[in-house]
């Protein structure tokens, strides 16, 4: 998933200085961003008041959109470094191509996990013959310094572990919950889960008190620790929780995102996560010159040009607001 903003601003994130070490209820409002030719997303991270949740550094929610007579998602080849992308669908399909030669059609509740490592490029598009509705989320996970130069690779997992409770089915996207572990490769202590609740479900979801958490509302009406959430909103929950009260006021879908607070200080600009301005400048130059990031074969169209770098120096900092 690309950040297609032509006026891309750097985000400084990471570090533990602004991690909330106790339970909170911080409602994050989305920013609407055009993605490609016909898709609009609601961007929850990075947010004006919250840059990361664990290693989760970027969250877009889109749909449900009626694309029966539209091309749907059309994101040309673009680069990434220093991160993992997570593609997650509730409805529709997304065709993934990348510079390692991977080609996969991702369908609802299948994990498309791309590790950029030192450098990769990819495209995302709705297949020509596609379902009427497109609804999902695209997320990034920052890679720690020890692993951010790994060889790029792509994983497509069509079957993921689930846990159930009265009124709840939880699909483990990354990490593990209650002994059920995702096959997706992770590089930091992290968790991601898709929660499906039936109308009237009331339960306390067990959590790790050492993790910080947030919940993204995908569909329906639900109260998370007493806070009503509407689709496309996200509630930051802080750390120190051992359980999370959930009450479904209709059939509802949520994404639980969490992890150990990310210690390292980062610069995130456009589709790159680095540590210094020099790294970002070199990555942009390499992409524009056609080196390092490889070639996406089979996409009907040219690559996405990088925006201009901002005139101000980029400096890695902690979780500043």
Image (tube, rainbow, N blue to C red):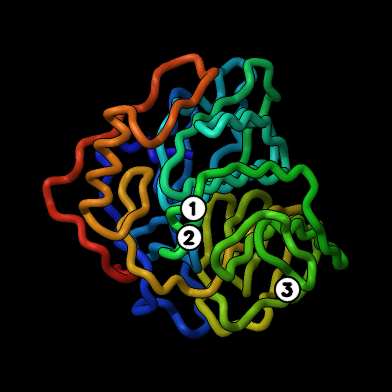
User: What residue appears at the point 50 percent right and 68 percent down from the top-left corner?
Assistant: 54
Relative horizontal placement of residue 277, taking residue 265 as reference (left or right) = left
Q: Is residue 76 above or below residue 262?
A: above
Q: Is residue 194 visible?
A: no
* Among numbered discs 3 and 1, the one appearing first in the sequence: 1
Q: Is residue 168 visible?
A: yes
Q: Position of residue 233 (x, y in %)?
A: 52, 55
Q: Nearer the viewer, residue 266 or 167?
A: 266
Q: Residues within 10 Å of mark 2 (few under 14, many from 20)?
A: some
Q: Which residue in the structure is indicated by mark 2?
A: 147
Q: Position of residue 104 (x, y in %)?
A: 66, 31
- Cα separation, mark 2 vs mark 3, equals 31 Å
Q: Is residue 101 above or below residue 318?
A: above
Q: Which residue in the structure is indicated by mark 1?
A: 150
Q: Nearer the viewer, residue 112 or 28?
A: 112
Q: Which residue in the structure is indicated by mark 3?
A: 205
Helix, strand or loop at mark 2: helix
Helix, strand or loop at mark 3: strand
For the C terminus, the image quarter is bottom left
């Amino acid at each position: 998933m690309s950040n297609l903003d032509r006026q891309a601003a750097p985000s400084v994130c990471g570090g533990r200085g602004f991690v909330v070490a106790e339970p909170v209820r911080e409602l994050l409002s989305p920013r609407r961003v055009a993605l490609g030719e016909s898709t609009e997303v609601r961007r929850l991270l990075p947010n004006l008041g919250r840059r990361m949740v664990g290693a989760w550094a970027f969250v877009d929610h889109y749909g449900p959109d009626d694309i029966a007579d539209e091309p749907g998602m059309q994101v040309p080849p673009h680069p990434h470094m220093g991160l993992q992308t997570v593609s997650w669908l509730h409805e529709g399909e997304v065709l993934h191509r990348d510079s390692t030669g991977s080609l996969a059609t991702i369908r609802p509740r299948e994990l498309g996990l791309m590790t950029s490592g030192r450098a990769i490029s990819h495209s995302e598009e709705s297949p020509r013959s596609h379902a009427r509705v497109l609804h999902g989320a695209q997320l990034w996970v920052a890679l720690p310094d020890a692993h951010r130069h790994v060889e790029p690779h792509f994983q497509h997992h069509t079957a993921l572990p689930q846990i159930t409770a009265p009124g709840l089915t939880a699909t483990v996207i990354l990490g593990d919950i209650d002994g059920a572990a995702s096959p997706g490769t992770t590089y930091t202590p992290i968790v991601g889960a898709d929660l499906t609740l039936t109308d009237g479900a009331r339960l306390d979801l067990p959590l790790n008190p050492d993790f910080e958490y947030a919940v993204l509302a995908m569909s329906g009406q639900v109260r998370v620790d007493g806070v009503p959430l509407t689709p496309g909103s996200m509630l930051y929950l802080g750390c120190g929780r051992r359980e999370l009260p959930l009450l479904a006021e209709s059939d509802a879908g949520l994404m639980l995102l969490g992890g150990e607070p990310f210690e390292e200080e980062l610069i995130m600009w456009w589709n790159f996560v680095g540590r210094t301005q020099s790294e970002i400048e070199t990555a942009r130059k390499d992409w524009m010159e056609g080196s390092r990031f490889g070639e996406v074969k089979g996409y009907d169209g040219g690559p996405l040009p990088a925006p201009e770098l901002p005139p101000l120096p980029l400096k890695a900092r902690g979780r500043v607001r």
